[in-house]
Amino acid sequence: MFSYSHDKTHLYTLVFSIAIVGILPLIFTLGPTGYANTSPFELVDLLQGNNVDLRSNNTDTCEQLQLTIESWLRGAFSIDFYNNRKTDSYVLWGQLLPVRCDFQSENGVFTVCPTEDRKDFFPDSELLICEISESAPLNNTLSFLADELHLRPGVLISVSNEIDVEFDSIVETFNVTVIFNLDHSVALLNTSSLILQTALLCLILVGLSILRFDAKKLVIEPLRRMLKIVLRYAANPLSPTPRNKSKKKKGGSDDAFDRGNNSDSDSDYDANKDQLGNYETEKLITAIAKITDLLRKCWGVAGAGIISSNLARTPDGKTVVFNPLVPGKLVYALFGFAGINEFSKQLRALDQEVINLINDVAKVIHEEVYRWGYGDSGQCNKNLGGAFLMVYRIGDFKDVKKKRETAANVIFSQEKQSGTRLATLKNRKSQHRRKNTLIRRRNKQTNIGMDTVQLASLPGITTFTDRALIGMLKSFAGIYRDRRLLNWKNDFRLGAGVGAFSVDMIFGMDAGWAVEGAVGSGYKIDATYLSPHVNMASRMMSACKQYGVSILLSQAVEELLSQPARSKLRHLDTVTVKGSSVKQRIFTYDARHVGVDFFLFERSPDQADLDSDRYTPNIWNIDQDLKAMRQHITEDFEEVFKDGRRKYLSGNWKEAIECFREADKIMITTMIEEGYLEFNLSSARVLSNDNENEETIRLRQEMGDGPCRCLISFMEREGGTPPKNWKGYRPLTSK
């Protein structure tokens, strides 16, 4: 596009330059004299005037005429500008009539030849010219001199002035004819013309260069930048704007989330008057960057395909027809829901200011999800009131399947060469038998009509899943560390002015496939994900309220985690969720904020980015946030709870209830002994089952284990004995 325009610009520049250099000098020939050299004519007129005035033949007049001719001839030398000296005569030959004085020759011819006493001052070449001039015939004098002096006839000019004068009734003719040598004048004129045209050409080129520079700076380069922005967003709509790259690093603070920041970003350009921000083209670039940035933030990862397909070009370079309702595509991803607990109460209390609360929560969640997402895969898809849908996109179905097959071919080829293929296949079959069973169940349930990929078999999936879970847990820690969110404790409408309120979050995660695309019509569309796995993540989040935990993970997510991460999870129950007949184990990471001061472990954005970049599976054992939120879990508690869960699933509910009560008591005892919670009652009263006052019950619920109480409550509602059709799992009837 630009190459073709540049070629045309160069052609126009050449034609314009030739026109000015070639045609402009011709304009000066349009004057009355053609702007020719008139000095020869003026000199002849001057000599003719003296010839007429000195028409007498007396001695005094003749002497004066002789002096006049000699004076006139002394000015008839041309200057050689190349050698900086006087050289060839300007006047080669002359004739003055009538002949009336003794110093005149018979035919009235005169030349610049010196007298005998001055010949020594003239070079031989000039004396030769004098001799040739004196021997010139009266007829055809011009041609003779040109031939003898080897001059071009065009540089010799013959000028005559003839006039009839009447004196005493006698008419007498006065004539002056002079042949001038214009060789040096022509040479000087040509040199001057060459210098003039060269200077004019240089001036034109400089002017055009200046104009071209301005055009390049103000038009071409901005257009290129705009085109690059569009092409970059067509290739990757989730790429950040160039302006933001220099302003903030990954995971850094984003002013888009800052309340009250209504300043125009154009002021960044206005601050420096030397920048291009003062020009309309740069304003247009800024507008395009803002629009694409808004598309990225509003539509998120689900809308990336819509943006890319509508900004893309056809193979012949043309833009595609605008169609926001592009076909959906199958993708694999980890889905996470984060919800504000008891959001309806906060909505009624804050009214329109609830938006500020949501934005404060979103700032923390978006920042951590984006920071810990593998390869920038973590994105927030949408906000549903007090809940947020996060997507850790693994890839398109076709791409994931192709890459998995490529990796498998490499692995199997190496195994074949080493002779260990059979043993490896047996080990792999043993390791993944449990995972394959779950995959077959899910395929049977969803019946999506395609060859599903076992996500657990993807290379690097454990790192991908670990980072996704850490992003959720870091969001949990950030909620209780963010100063803006802590300031809501002082809001009288929420905490009655005594700091009784805190923003509590619950999280749910699932893994699997989804249809990514646009839902709506030509009037309004919404980029989203449609899948039972998205619903499952929502069910996991909602179930947190039943079990009294902060996060619940499906079995699909647990199987994708690394071994260090799985060792930190607690298997709570085996259930079927509402809308699904597939039983699965559900897990939690025991995250609790009570008794934890997350401010002690605060990291700067740069340090947090560095922690993310240096991820290793050992982070589950050394990260201060992850350890602190799980500090209330002891080995005794875990052993007793596992024993109770085993008896519960096997149908021995009576002993299971006792185990769960014992585990709950261990949890309360740990909280009291470690001083994780401050209270006014004695520890004995809190631990005593005989004390059932309201304050004691509240403290037990706050310090005890939510899953233990949830399972005890379920079994007691069933009468303490399992139903006859008990198969080791139960349905979760609530969403």
Image (cartoon, helix red, strand yellow):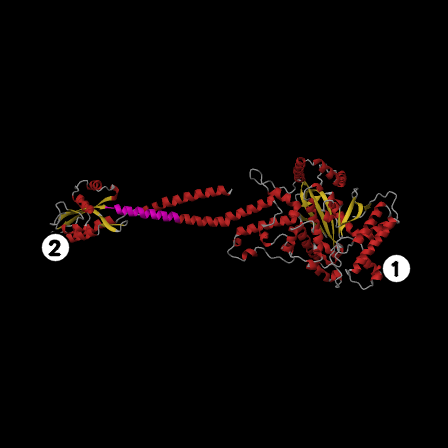
Q: Observer-nearest residue: 734 or 437?
A: 437
- Camera-nearest residue between 477 and 347: 477
- In percent of width and height, residue 122 lies at 19, 49
User: Chief secondary structure of the magenta span?
Assistant: helix
**Is 194 covered by the magenta stretch?**
yes
In the rendered structure, does residue 228 fall within the stretch colored magenta? Answer: no
> Disc 1 and disc 2: Cα gap in Å?
161 Å
Residue in the image at 57% along x and 44% along y:
231
Q: Circle 1 — which element?
A: loop
Q: Give the residue number, with chain letter if any, for mark 1.
A: 690
| Residue stretch in magenta | 181-202
Q: Amino acid at mark 1?
A: Asp
Please state which of residues 414 and 103 is positioned toward the viewer in this rendering. Answer: 414
Q: Is residue 276 left or right of residue 141?
A: right
Residue 60 image label:
2
- Mark 1 or mark 2: name the one nearer the start of the chain: 2
Marking on residue 13: none
Left/right placement of residue 217 relative to residue 289 reads left
Q: Residue furthest front?
A: 419
x%, y% of residue 470?
70, 51
